[in-house]
Amino acid sequence: MALKKRVIKRFREQGALARFAAGLLTKALRERKGPLLVALPGGRTPLALFEALAAARADWSRVHFFMADERLVPPGSPASNFGQASRSFFSKIAIPPRNLHAVKPGPPRRAAAAYGREIKELAGRAGVPDLVFLGLGEDGHIASLFPGSAALRAAAGPVLPARAPAGVKPVSRITLSLPALNAAPTVALMAIGRAKKAVFARAAAGDAALPAGRLRPHGELYLLYSDESPARQRPARRKK
């Protein structure tokens, strides 16, 4: 299937980017019946998004949250992507605990297989999240799909074990696969800060040398960039 919609948007402030991205979730809720499966990123990029989502009006009982990737660390570790999402977002909304899907600790292959099954049980025939938010690394990585990673070459499985490159910790991870990302109905790639301006341009141009440049979802692809540094993050405006 071919990409149906591709949108590139640039914002002065990351708060505006975050509110636009949060609007993709509320729009998806309005346009569909039943549950909405959403994958969230880790790192610093989603912090503004989490604020915008927490300020949004949404029926959170219909939303199931997964992580686009996870470091295989104890749930209470500061390095846990799910832990960061819990502190910055989940704790601020009224959502049933059963709608929050953390990776269960274990060996990488076992953890990846179990998480993949958990997604499939809710996603049904599609087998992938409905909406995926991704951050963009300065090296062009998305989720835990790094340049040259063996996980990039894997053709099967929605969730795969992955390893971070030398010097990046924690090393052991799991990640949504590139085929799973490209099977998602909607993907939003977010890049924040001028340090990512050049790599964002390459990703937007479809540079296949970058994992981000290989995003070709079957539905909608949103490429979102803000010059504002994450260090200058401003609170998202709460809707009245």
Image: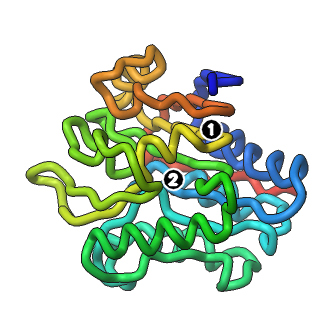
Which of the pair 75/50 is nearer the observer? 75
Q: Amino acid at mark 1?
A: Leu
In the picture provided, is 74 more to the left or to the right than 5?
Answer: left
In the picture provided, is 119 more to the left or to the right than 159?
Answer: right
Mark linked to residue 149? none
Q: Going by the picture, which residue comes out furthest to the left?
A: 166
Q: Is residue 37 visible?
A: yes
- Helix, strand or loop at label 2? It is helix
Q: Amino acid at mark 2?
A: Pro
Which of the pair 122/137 is nearer the observer? 122
Residue at image x 60%, y 22%? 8
Mark linked to residue 46? 2
Q: Going by the picture, which residue comes out furthest to the top?
A: 205
Report the residue marked by disc 1.
Answer: 17
The quarter holding residue 62 reads: bottom right
Residue 63: horizontal and vertical position, in percent? 74, 66
Residue 60: horizontal and vertical position, in percent? 78, 70
